[in-house]
Image (cartoon, helix red, strand yellow):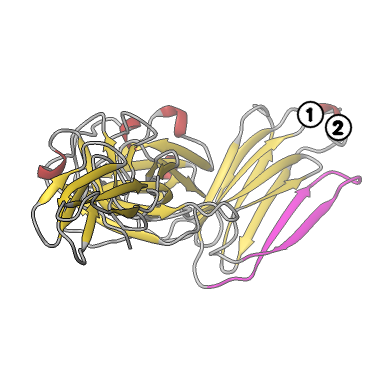
Amino acid sequence: MKQKLLLLIFFLGSLLVQGQNEYAILIKSKITSPSIWPDNDYTGLHQISVGMNSCSIIFQAENYKDDLYCFFYVTGNPTKIDFMEVLGGSPTCGQITRTIPYNKDTFSYSSFAGCLANAEIMSLHITRPDSSPKCKEDPITLNNGWNWKYKFDNGAWDNLPTQFQEQTSITFKIKDLPGYVSQSNVHFKAGYENYKQYTNTVSYAIIGCSPELAEKKPTAKSVECNNTATGSVTLKFESLLKKDDQFLFNLIRVDPAAPNTGPTTSITASEKETENKSYTWDKIAAGTYIIKYQAQSKFDNGKIVGSSAIVTDPFTIENKEELTFKTTAIQPKCNGDLGSIEISVTGGTSPYFYILDNGIKTPLTKNPDTINGVTDGDHTVIVLDSFGCTEN
């Protein structure tokens, strides 16, 4: 006859190492559908060994529906996992073994499809894609855990919310964690709560979130003179910087052939400089750019923004047409009369001005315009536009 089985756990080897270790293994086993159990099987066993450490799950009698677990720390530098299933009364399955490679720094997950029960073999050693400082809105991803705990600064450990428990990989934001106000650091550890055993701890510095853009495309102002670094761009923000923060701006020239790979220029801006929720970056040459920026501590000397930087839409600082002018001497009609000079200007920015023979700057009232009352002889004329640009 077929029997319903009860899963009990017992431990072998160094299951509970005194103190906390950096690496551990968690096994989750569950009996498969009763319809495929071999006849006359009254007992069974799952055993896993990693180096000198191991644990076992023994299957007996009732309550076959439960997920059962065993946990042990990994010591030393073992190179393989040995997994075994034994069914004491089964002529069909007998003993099933499997060996898989193991590296404690890279192993994450494996599974075992047994005759009596299936098992998941999980690494407990937190890994993460990056360790850069996070603001409360930045996603944080942690891998290789099961039951997760956190604490702020030097506070007490607390459980992450229920939706993040019994998950090998989780993604969340600092603002999702109860108790967050404005702490400086957050720490995480993972393990198996039933045994109160946990592995390594990882930490993040908490930074202020960068104020969002009020307008994704900044307001650009063209250069004042042809081919000069006299353009500017103004960014507008939805909120102010936090106390003791500063902006780090990266200006990146847009390369149409390879976007966002052009040269980068960096500057910082203080709370005072952005107190009106705007900032104007001047002395920029003509071209098409994006700006990436983030908030950082005013004590941070970094020059390149991180992965959580906010990016503007592309904007263009227009060049100005080069200022040129033409002068034409107008001879006097009669001997003894004064002559004139006609000036015609193109490019630059009106209104225009002229200086005759190092005299005073005088407006040109129309274009072309005529300077009257010019004496006989050689004369020097300089033409300027409204920004003081002259002909090159």
What residue is shown with label 2?
A: 36
Q: Viewed as shown, does residue 39 lie left or right of 228?
A: right
The structure residue drawn at horizontal position 54% and vertical position 52%, both measured from the top left corner, is: 259
| In the foreground, 235 or 341 | 341
Query: Would you place residue 108 above or below residue 167 in this image?
Result: below
Estimate the spatial distance between the alpha carbons at disc 1 and disc 2, rounded to whole Å: 6 Å
Q: Whole-percent x and y of residue 65?
A: 66, 27
Q: Whole-percent x and y of residue 34?
A: 80, 28
Name the amino acid type tagged 2.
Answer: Ile
What residue is shown with label 1?
A: 33
Query: Quadrant location of residue 156?
Result: top left
Q: From the image, which quarter does the C terminus lie in?
A: bottom left
| In the foreground, 231 or 101 | 231
Residue 224 visible? The answer is yes
The structure residue drawn at horizontal position 24% and vertical position 44%, both measured from the top left corner, is: 370
Q: Viewed as shown, does residue 79 lie left or right of 105?
A: right
Q: Viewed as shown, does residue 39 lie left or right of 63?
A: right
